Each structure stands twice: as structure tokens, then as C-alpha cells.
Amino acid sequence: MIKNLEQVVSMILNSFQDPNSRVRWAAINAIGQLSTDLGPDLQIHYHQQVLPALALAMDDFQNPRVQAHAASAVLNFTENCTPETLIPYLDGIVSKLLVLLQNGKQMVQEGALTALASVADSSQEHFQKYYDAVMPYLKVILVNATDKSNRILRAKSMECISLVGMAVGKDKFRDDAKQVMEVLMTLQGSQLENDDPITSYMLQAWARLCKCLGQDFLPYMNVVMPPLLNSAQLKPDVTITSAETDDEIDSDDDSIETITLGDKRIGIRTSVLEEKATACNMLCCYADELKEGFFPWIDQVAPTLVPLLKFYFHEEVRKAAVSAMPELLRSAKLAVEKGLALGRDESYVKQLSDYIIPALVEALHKEPEIEICATMLDSLNECIQLVGKLLNEGQVRCIVDELKHVITASTTRKSERAERTKGEDFDADEGELLQEENEQEEEVFDQVGDCLASLIKTFKTSFLPFFDELSIYVTAMLGKDKSPEERRIAICIFDDVAEQCQEAALKYYDNYLPFLLEACNDENSDVRQQPDNVMAYDNAVSALGKICQFHRNSIDAAQIVPSWLSCLPIKGDLIEAKVVHEQLCSMVERSDSELLGPNNQYLPKVVSVFAEVLSAGKDLATEQTAGRMVTLLRQLQQTLPPAVLASAWSALQPQQQLALQSALST
């Protein structure tokens, strides 16, 4: 639709003027939907038409439904909007929404609250200008909307207050925050009904207040945590019947989701699961935000969340539990390191790690969703980095075996997808789905590479017996039939082995060096040409440089060192670039014969690399390395025959010549 968006937007906005209020409502609904589905294109190109039209629609006091819906569409629009796009319209929109907040109709007030929350969230610190005008109205609703009929209104006021607080920051919000939290504490202490929608809003509001206030939130944790743990520990409300009968499950009940497994039909009450998922997300959020301050709660939270790594009724619950694992370990580790852990020492971190990591590995083995597999690997990687050598050999063995299983399962799934493309009914929609699944698979491989990198960096040469087992999987990823992403990951893994294990890695060179050379020199390969794979290329060059540096006697240096030089400079991975260009500098300083070549034949290339690096400012070399390059160039000016220098200079682009002249003259 993006091709025809101008016509579509124009047609819909014309209907904003339709005499029939139902048509106006439908037009606003269409703009809201387009804002969600075609953002941010719609926001970037049509904000000048859409936002004023929505602001005008909020003046339709004869039709509160239209007003409320216009406010809701502002929410849809601002969710995909940058602050820069919004700023020119903020005065008008905020003043209109404030008028709606004071409207007698609850539906209109609810729409205005949700829109204000989104506007604040999207405009961030730019919302400070409106804070003093907006916050009093929000607090009035929070304090006074006490009737059961006003529950959602009150819930939305909490949401709005907490998002406004996060947008404007702690210093501006601090005084009001105290008052707001007093109301929330009173509300939390009251007997809310089990399915009260306010519970979920309250859990999220507390977490946002924590994000806003940071460590200043700690005094409220004793109030917040007990009900939060209760929500996280909710048992799923499940009804099981025979698939043949509908007797016990009301299939028309929107709050119940049914799935059929074999000859059983399972009904699950979704509201319970959503509350549970929200609570688990909030626990993760508190651990992340409060770091060592969360330590007192770990002994209750860990046994709550670890079993939920295998909670197959609800993906969001699993995801939240998975994300929380490294946060719990980090909290424990920091508390012990800072002496805040009440007499506990490193053995406590070890004990927690022994509980979390095997559970995470086991859950990964059974996880049915590819996307969650990738998240689990990401969490596992963070855990490995946090606990390091506290991992024992048995745990490393389990992790390595699971990584083998993940690679094998992923490769099998990719082969099955390739087979699906050959089917008669394969079409474009199916192709799009396959591409999405393959992208998720790439993410899994990426995370496997990160886990291996962490293990190699932690255990260095003592990890090599495990790497011997994995090597066959890694070399398989370098095959010509593999994706550029897989090849990049395999090169990075070998790069880590070469860097971390030095001499001990020598035995792998015969196997890996041909792949590295190919990755460096094949001008037509995906790895070389595609910008998406520039990191793989840079890592290959860096790994090859380390081999030239540490293992010169084990390679055909006369061939490989010039091959390495031909790949310079590298410009994608700025960390590797600084390392590689510093290495080049050192080699020129000691007049490396293989680098400069017979009769200095590679010197023009060296000068060209120096010129490119110096013309890039501070990106490609440290200040110290750049200074050394300038010194070397000045020396070359003094010592080399003019013809050699003229040849080197002539190979440069005009802007590089200027950069070089500038560097040499200062």
C-alpha cells in the first residue's frame, strides 16, 4: 500500500469531514490502523496532514465516540513517531487532550489518558514543558476514580502518570512520585478482586516508577514484591475435556483459549496467564533496574522463575523467565562483590549458578519455539560471562553437548525448509514465511557463536578438548552452500581461538587457513561484497593478521602477508580496525620484508592504507597509531627514491592526497 499511500491518506482524510459521524469514526479508525501497519513511513511523510486532522476531530463534542477514537488514533500515530516529528504539534495536541481529560464522558477521558501516555513516551524530555499543566489532572483522576465503574479509568491514569514520570525524569517527577506511590500502596493494600483489570496496570506502573526513580525506589519494594510474587506464582486455570464434546468449555467465551492435543481439548483462561506474564516481566525489570539492590529477593524469585523456563502454556511467561536468569546472577554477584550480601560470599553465586544454568540448558533442549531458543542462548551467554570459571567441567560438557544439539537441529530444520520450496503448492506467501524462519535460524547460529566465544575467552586452552569436538560443526558452517551469516560466525569463532589460545591453536591452522584466505581475497564472494557481512570480513582479516604476527614460521609468509595487506584498511568493525592498523604500523616500523615485498613493491599499498586511515579521523586508528603513521610517512619522504614515492602518491584519491598533505604539514 505504501506505493499508493498518498491517494489512500487523502481519501481517508476527506472522510474526516463526512456529515455522518459513523463515517468519520471509520475514517479515524482507518488512520489509526495505517499508523500501526505502515509506520513509520506514514508518520514521516504525512504527519503534516494527519496530526492536525486528528486534533480537529477531538473537537467533535456532539459525538464523544468520535472524540475518543481520535485520541486513540493519536496513540497509534505517536507509537511510531520520533520526538522531532512530534515537537511542532505538541502544544496543540496536549492542550486538546487536557480539554478531553476534563470531559464528563468516561470513554473520552480514557482515550485522552492513553493518548497522553503515548505522546509523553514518544516525546520524552520534550514533555517537561507540559508537566506542570498535565500532572494535577492525572492525580485528580487517580485519587477520585474510586467507583467500580471507574476501574479502567483509574488504571489508565496510573499508566499515564508512570509514563509521564519516565519521560520527564526523576528530578522533575520526584515530589509527585511520593504522593502517587502512597495512593498505589493504599490500593495495593485493599482487597482487589482476582480478575480486577487494575492489577496488571498497577504491576506495570510500579515497574515504571522503579525505572524512573532507580535506587530511590528501594524503600517501596517491601510493598511491591509480595503481590507481585503472588501474581507470578498463579497456577494456570485449565479445563480438560474430550475433543468430541463441548460440554465443559464455552467456546464463545473470549477469556478462554482452547487448544486440541490428540483426543483432548484444553481450555486455558487467558486473563490469569496475562497477569502471570506481566508479573514475570516486572520481576525481570526490577532485577535489571535495581542490580545489587534486588539481592534480598533472589531467594524467593529464583525458585519462582526457574520452573517457568518450561512453562509451555504461555510464551511471554517463558520469555520473561529466560530474560531474568542473567539479571538474578548479576544481582547476586554485585551484592557479594560490594559486601551487601549479608555475610554471603562467592559460594552463594556458585550455588545460584548451579541452580540456574543447568535448568536453562535443559529448557533450551526442550524449547519448541525458534525465537525463544535464540533468547535462551543469549541468556545462557550472559550467564557464562557472569560466572566464568565458577562453571565446572560437567556443566561446560552439558553446555557444549547442547550447542551441538542446537546446531544439528537448526541445520535439519533448514534442510526441511529447502525441501518445502520444491513442493507444488509453494507460493510467495510461503516464501516470505520461510525467509522469516530462516532469519530466526540465523539468530540462533549467532547466539551459538557468542556462547562459544564466551567459553573460549573464559577457559582459553583448557577449552580446546571441547573445541576439538565442535570443530567439525564449525567447519561445516564455512561451506560454500552456507549463508554469509554462518560463515561470518564460523570465522569469528576461529578468530577467538587464534587470539585466546595462541600457540595451542596452531594445530587448527591447516584446516581453517584456506577458508580465511578465501574470505579475504574472493572479490565476488558474499562475505566480501555485502555490507551486511562486513563484520565477518573484518574479523577474517584480523584473524589472519594475528596468524601473521604470532605464527609466521608456520605459514607461507611471502604469500599470506601480502594477501593480508591487500585487504587493508578495514572499516566496518572499528574495534578490530584499530588493532589491525596498529599492527600494520609496527610491521612497517621494523621494515618487515614480507610486508614491503621485493624492492619495496608493496610500499604504495602501505602508503595508500595510511592515507585512508588518516583521512578517516579517529575512527580507524587510535591517536597514538595515527601519530606513528605520520612519523613513518615523514621518514619515508626522507629516505625513499622520489620515483617510488611518486608512484605511491599517484595511486591515491584526490581527497586522500589532501588528507595526507594536511597530516604531514601539521
Image (cartoon, rainbow, N blue to C red):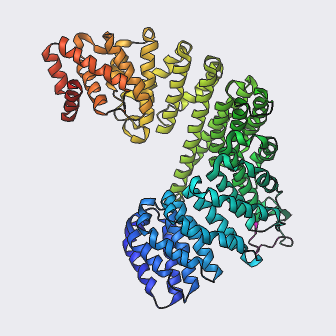
Q: Looking at the picture, does residue 481 appear above or below residue 86?
A: above
Q: Main secondary structure of the magenta part?
A: loop
Q: What residue do we see at 54% from left, 83% from top?
A: 66
| Depth order, front residue of 148/342 | 342
Does 638 sit left or right of 543 as displayed? left
Percent x, y of residue 40: 45, 61
Q: x, y percentage for residue 587?
A: 35, 14
Q: Relative to residue 386, is residue 74 depicted above or below?
A: below
- The magenta span reads 248-257
Q: Evaluate whether residue 393 shows in this view.
A: yes
Relative image position of residue 494 (x, y in whole percent): 52, 25
Which quarter of the picture shows residue 43? bottom left
* Residue 277, image quadrant: bottom right
Query: Does any portion of residue 483 appear in the rendered image?
Result: no
Q: Position of residue 317 (x, y in %)?
A: 72, 53
In this orientation, which residue lies closer to the viewer: 225 or 594?
225
Q: Nearer the viewer, residue 188 or 562?
A: 188
